Image (spheres, rainbow, N blue to C red):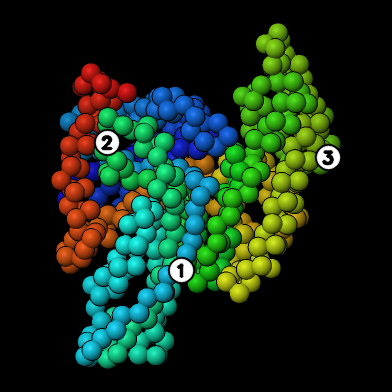
């Protein structure tokens, strides 16, 4: 099987991250990666389509040198965090008039029947998994190869977003790719899968994506996403505090946060840190101790409020979630802050860890990439894309409707799209980005 290429993109509120992968036999190797400040996204929303298009173009163009010269078929999978993510449970009972052996194709037909209600309402399904099965009034873990005489009842867990959730992002790619072919996934959900394993998700785990615009929380239990919560406080408030106190720009505040700040109430280190004034008239300085205090005060407030919200959710949703033995996993750009883990442990307990890549479909991943929480959503996005492709092929082989039509349509135009995007990005057509 020839090697193929895929670009995974995570479009975030502060940075857009991209990784170029080479893949063969369902194994993915990163060849290059890059992040650029997202231009055109304000307050977590796309407000300038042309600007974010240029950001995406810059990342894709930067990967050209890593590709063989005659490469035309480069796939693209995209991630973007939406605040309108919903989780439902749908019940369904299939009745039978005679004895029948349950096969995998029967479950696929049941799933397609359930999700058809969502697709008919133009809802975008991001994740769907069976929760339980009752075969002739007897609970079974997996009904395949069992014989049913009367009925098979099941519950399907569905994660979905409204049809307009990715509308502006789709518009970013207009004239390059038709709507039906854009593989777009929710970044927070993708990251949550990337930093947890099957055991974590089974015993219960809370994943916190500590982002620039807000914190997004995904809670797993019994192997499935149970709850999603968008907490409207993020690292931008830390940057605002630095800007206001030091009278500097957000870019300079971000540099101070990443390069110099430590999340500590007090420090004995005596150090002066230079920074550029927002007026551009010159430089000033701040002590290490003051910078740390500015950061610590806001981080502690955010974590305290977040902890309160999690406690409230745990109390109100006890029957749905129960005990979460897997603890808390934190990812996102905010988890990169020096000493932030100690602040979180002080407020939320010791059953906590920073997220790292758990997916074994990736190999030869550089340590600096594997351990960078800002790039973890990209790995999750690629994993979601891979699973969708496997499911589409399986459904096509088994002639399961309506997924087959969708797959055939995608395969029909796939080469044309990726040839088109490569031509436009490399100047092969006049209407390039």
Q: Nearer the viewer, mark 2 or mark 3?
A: 2
Q: Residue furthest front?
A: 121
Badge 2 or badge 1: first in the primary sequence: 1
Q: Secondary structure at mark 3?
A: loop
Marks 2/1: CA–CA distance: 33 Å
Residue at 30% across, 68% down: 113
The answer to which quarter of the image holds residue 130 is: bottom left
Residue at 67% across, 27% down: 253
Residue at 17% across, 67% down: 398
The answer to which quarter of the image holds residue 207 is: bottom right
**What residue would you read off at disc 3?**
266
Residue 1 visible from this viewpoint: yes
Locate residue 333, reporting x and y percent.
58, 41
Name the residue nearer the viewer: 272 or 383. Answer: 383
Q: Nearer the viewer, mark 2 or mark 1?
A: 1
Instruction: Say which mark, if any, is on residue 414.
Output: none
Q: Is residue 430 left or right of residue 249?
A: left
Badge 3 or badge 1: first in the primary sequence: 1
Instruction: Say which mark, if any, is on residue 177.
Output: 2
Q: Residue furthest top?
A: 281
Locate residue 259, reporting x and y percent.
64, 31
Marks 2/3: CA–CA distance: 53 Å
Q: Secondary structure at mark 2?
A: loop
């Amino acid at each position: 099987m020839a090697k193929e290429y895929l670009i995974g993109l995570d479009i975030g509120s502060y940075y857009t991250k991209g990784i170029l992968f080479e893949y063969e036999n369902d194994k993915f190797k990163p060849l290059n990666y890059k992040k650029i400040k997202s231009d055109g996204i304000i307050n977590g929303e796309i407000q300038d389509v042309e600007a974010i298009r240029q950001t995406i173009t810059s990342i894709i163009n930067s990967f050209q040198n890593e590709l063989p010269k005659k490469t035309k078929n480069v796939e693209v999978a995209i991630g973007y965090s939406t605040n309108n993510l919903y989780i439902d449970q749908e019940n369904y009972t299939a009745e039978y008039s005679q004895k029948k052996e349950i096969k995998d194709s029967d479950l696929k037909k049941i799933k397609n029947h359930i999700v058809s209600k969502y697709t008919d309402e133009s809802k975008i399904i991001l994740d769907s998994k069976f929760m339980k099965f009752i075969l002739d009034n007897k609970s079974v873990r997996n009904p395949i190869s069992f014989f049913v005489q009367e009925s098979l009842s099941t519950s399907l867990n569905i994660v979905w977003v409204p049809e307009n959730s990715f509308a502006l992002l789709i518009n970013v790619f207009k004239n390059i790719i038709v709507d039906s072919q854009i593989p777009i996934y929710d970044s927070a959900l993708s990251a949550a899968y990337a930093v947890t394993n099957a055991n974590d998700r089974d015993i219960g785990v809370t994943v916190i994506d500590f982002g620039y615009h807000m914190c997004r929380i995904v809670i797993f239990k019994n192997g499935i996403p149970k709850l999603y919560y968008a907490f409207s406080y993020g690292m931008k408030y830390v940057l605002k505090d630095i800007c206001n106190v030091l009278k500097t720009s957000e870019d300079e505040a971000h540099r101070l946060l990443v390069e110099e700040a430590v999340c500590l109430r007090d420090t004995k280190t005596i150090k002066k840190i230079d920074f550029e004034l927002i007026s551009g008239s010159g430089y000033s300085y701040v002590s290490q101790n003051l910078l740390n205090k500015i950061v610590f005060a806001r981080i502690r407030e955010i974590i305290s409020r977040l902890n309160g919200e999690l406690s409230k959710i745990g109390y109100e949703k006890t029957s749905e979630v129960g005990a979460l033995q897997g603890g808390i996993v934190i990812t996102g750009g905010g988890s990169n802050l020096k000493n932030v883990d100690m602040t979180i442990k002080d407020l939320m307990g010791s059953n906590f860890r920073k997220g790292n890549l758990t997916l074994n479909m990736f190999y030869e991943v550089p340590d600096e990439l594997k351990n960078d929480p800002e790039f973890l959503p990209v790995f999750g996005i690629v994993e979601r894309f891979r699973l969708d492709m496997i499911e589409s092929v399986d459904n096509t082989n088994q002639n399961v409707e309506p997924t087959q039509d969708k797959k055939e349509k995608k395969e029909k135009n796939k080469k044309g799209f990726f040839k088109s995007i490569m031509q436009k990005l490399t100047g092969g057509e006049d209407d390039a980005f």
